[in-house]
Amino acid sequence: MTVADIGPDTARAESGRGARLARRFTQSSAIWIFLVLVLLGIVFTLVTPAGSFASVANGKNILADSATILILAAGVTPLVIGGGLDISLGSVMSLSAVVTALVMSHISSAGTDHIWLAISVGMAAGIGVGLGWGVLNGSLIAFFEISPFIVTLGSLGAALGVARIISGGIDLDVVPIQIQSSIGISDLVGVPTPFVVGAVIAALLGSILAYSRFGEHTYLLGSSEEAAYRSGINVVRQKLCLYAIAGCAAGVAGVIDSAQYDIADVSSGHTTELLAALSAVFIGGASLYGGVGNMIGSVIGVFIPAVLANGLIIAGSDTFWQDVVVGMILVAAVGFDQWRRRPNR
């Protein structure tokens, strides 16, 4: 077929389809944040010693460092899309790590023959604590209609307080070394095991969001709670599930963090991980108002703080600049979301 054989209607249709694809491409937050990520990689490759940043070994370091952020971001993405918010996940992560460490220590003290039983039960206990705390948050928000910000702000302090009470206010170094060697610092087909765990969780939740009725209900709930209610969706149950998923993810992140560093940290409350995870979700295209977002954007957004921290360390800069830059990007992402929602822009 030659150009002359193509009629004007066909040409216009092809042109319109191409324009729509181009517009969708340029409007995708995931595309833009991926380009920012590539630019960061180029900058750090140029300003750091040759072979220090752009290397396979350092790539594995970035993947390992981003594992807990990826788990938290994957868990909170459905919640944000559903119109919710949880700022207590860092504290819940600390509580989960403490419970994991104490349970493992108690069971393993009975003898080395019980070490894998201790690891299994401890991990289950830590994840269960995260799940239970998420259900508690969701219950207060769904049944009593208390603001998510107020509930999770209270939970932020309460969960960290409980973690410090049961740990005596100190970081616990009683995590069995076997969990670090088998999970925390191990590889699976050349990829750090903690990152593989995060990738599996992100893929599972991303598939649920994209292809299941639960995902459809989540987007509808985030777009309009009233519309979701009128459509026959059990809004209370949906909110409970979303907060339970986020809490469970925090529990898994606490377990993985204790496995990576062989310690249960209660000093920081994992505020850096929380900021990075929330930033990843909003940078990746999710809206503060709900109803918008996807897992692919969140996953790409996860690497922004991870690459920043890694590159700053190699470049010899203070890693505290990471929080400054990530905070600025977060404000810019939310500001852009509000700008594009203006009807008269």
Image (tube, helix red, strand yellow):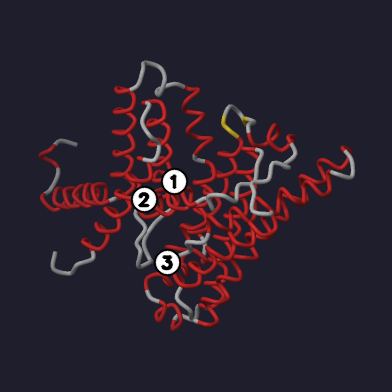
| Quadrant of image for the N terminus | top left
Q: Quadrant of residue 248?
A: bottom right
Vertical order, 27 against 232 (above or below) = above
| Residue hosting label 1 | 299
Q: Secondary structure at mark 2?
A: loop
Which sits in the foreground, 235 or 60?
60
Q: Are marks 1 and 2 in contact (CB under 8 Å)?
A: yes
Q: Quadrant of residue 302?
A: top left
Query: Can residue 73 be seen at all in this image of the molecule?
Result: no
Mark 1 and mark 2: Cα distance apart in space? 7 Å
Q: Which amino acid type corresponds to the residue marked 1 in the rendered image?
A: Val
Q: Residue at x 10, y 39 (%)?
A: 4
| Quadrant of image for the C terminus | bottom left
- Pointer 2 local density, CA inside 10 Å: few below 14, some 14–19, many at least 20: many
Q: Residue at x 39, y 46 (%)?
A: 301
The picture places residue 66, in percent across and down from the top left corner, at: 49, 40
Q: Residue at x 47, y 67 (%)?
A: 218
| Residue hosting label 2 | 284
Q: Which amino acid type corresponds to the residue marked 2 in the rendered image?
A: Gly
Mark 2 and mark 3: Cα distance apart in space? 16 Å
Q: Which amino acid type corresponds to the residue marked 3 in the rendered image?
A: Tyr
Q: Residue at x 26, y 47 (%)?
A: 25
Q: Which mark is residue 219?
A: 3
